[in-house]
Amino acid sequence: MLDYAALKALAAVIREGSFERAARALHVTPSAVSQRIRLLEERVGCALVVRGQPCSATETGRRLCQHVDRVRLLEQELQGALPALAREGIARVALPVAVNADSLATWFAPALAAFAAEAPVLVEVAVDDQDHTGEWLRSGAVLAAVTSTARPAAGCNSQPLGAMRYLAAASPAFVARHFAGGVGAGSLAAAPSLVFNTKDELQARWARRLCHRHVELPRHSLPSPQAFVTAALAGMGWGLQPQALVAGHLAAGRLVELVPCTPLDVALHWQHARAAAGLVEALSRRVETAARAALLPP
């Protein structure tokens, strides 16, 4: 049998980032947390926690944390069906999900908020590029993810959500200064672009499609969708902007497309662990409804 007190201690250390904060969350001493994890590591025969600031899980530790998350959701679902098991009320459980920043800044956050207002959960959102959120799901760090990957991870379901439309845009002054002679490989290689982080390939993908070859783009890195828009308005660079965020600026002429009628549509999918409880299904319904209203049809 698994030692669930030890598993809860492990999950608390990874969630809180330290043994001290985990101890406060569990209402025990840090030494008790340390002892439980040491005994669990001895039993499984390998390290489960990478001690650091913050603490992180090893591969085996992540799998055990994923198991704890699923058990908590199943227990909560059972308590909802059998209220006598929850005499003090149904406790909120952690529900880890991963999503790309542009979805979070546009259509995903309202769906998540509406779900969290009704469900006894504490949502933990991890933000990453849509091409990489699926890795969070495969590693067991989250139970559901918005991802550009259609193929479901092992033990997961995959549902197409639709496509998010991006437009290559910049301020009129920036376009006049850097693209007076037109938009091509040479001008793109000289004009500063905006990227979310080093994983962001949207600008490179758009340039490759336009020029039919790879273009090495000079880049400013801005890990915020709102800052991305602000930087473009200020003339800092050009970038692929979610249409939903910049439609008003384009209509008012504060931003212009580098090349009209050249959108980049990114297909998104919703993947979630099949073994997760009904709460994840309830979130899935919210997510799919919001996606139908905000995204292009799949």
Image: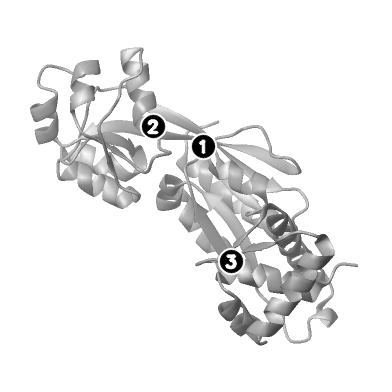
Q: Which residue is mark 3?
A: 51
Extreme residue toward the right, this view: 1
Q: Which residue is found at the position 51% from the left and 62% from the top?
A: 113
Q: Which residue is mark 1?
A: 131
Q: Which residue is found at the position 73% from the left and 72% from the top?
A: 37
Q: Which residue is found at the position 69% from the left and 39% from the top?
A: 153
In-front residue for pair 244/210: 210
Q: Position of residue 225 (x, y in %)?
A: 34, 48
Q: Position of residue 279 (x, y in %)?
A: 69, 60
Q: Earlier in the sequence, mark 2 or mark 3?
A: 3
Q: Which mark is residue 202?
A: 2
Q: Earlier in the sequence, mark 3 or mark 1?
A: 3
Q: Which mark lies nearer to you, 2 or 3?
A: 3
Tell me the amino acid under the disc marked 2.
Leu
Q: Earlier in the sequence, mark 2 or mark 1?
A: 1
Judged from the image, the secondary structure of the residue bearing numbered disc 3 is loop
Q: Quadrant of the N terminus?
A: bottom right
Measure the alpha-carbon separation of dots 2 and 3: 36 Å
Marks 2/3 in contact by CB < 8 Å: the verdict is: no
Q: Position of residue 39 (x, y in %)?
A: 79, 72
Tell me the amino acid under the disc marked 3.
Arg
What is the total number of numbered labels drawn onto the structure image? 3
In terms of image quadrants, where is residue 245? top left
Q: Could you classify mark 3 by the number of other residues whose Cα lies within 10 Å: few (under 14), some (14-19), or many (20 or more)? A: some
Marks 3/1 in contact by CB < 8 Å: the verdict is: no
In-front residue for pair 59/285: 59
Q: Could you classify mark 2 by the number of other residues whose Cα lies within 10 Å: few (under 14), some (14-19), or many (20 or more)? A: many
| Residue 184 in view here | no
In-front residue for pair 270/203: 203
Measure the alpha-carbon separation of dots 2 and 1: 10 Å
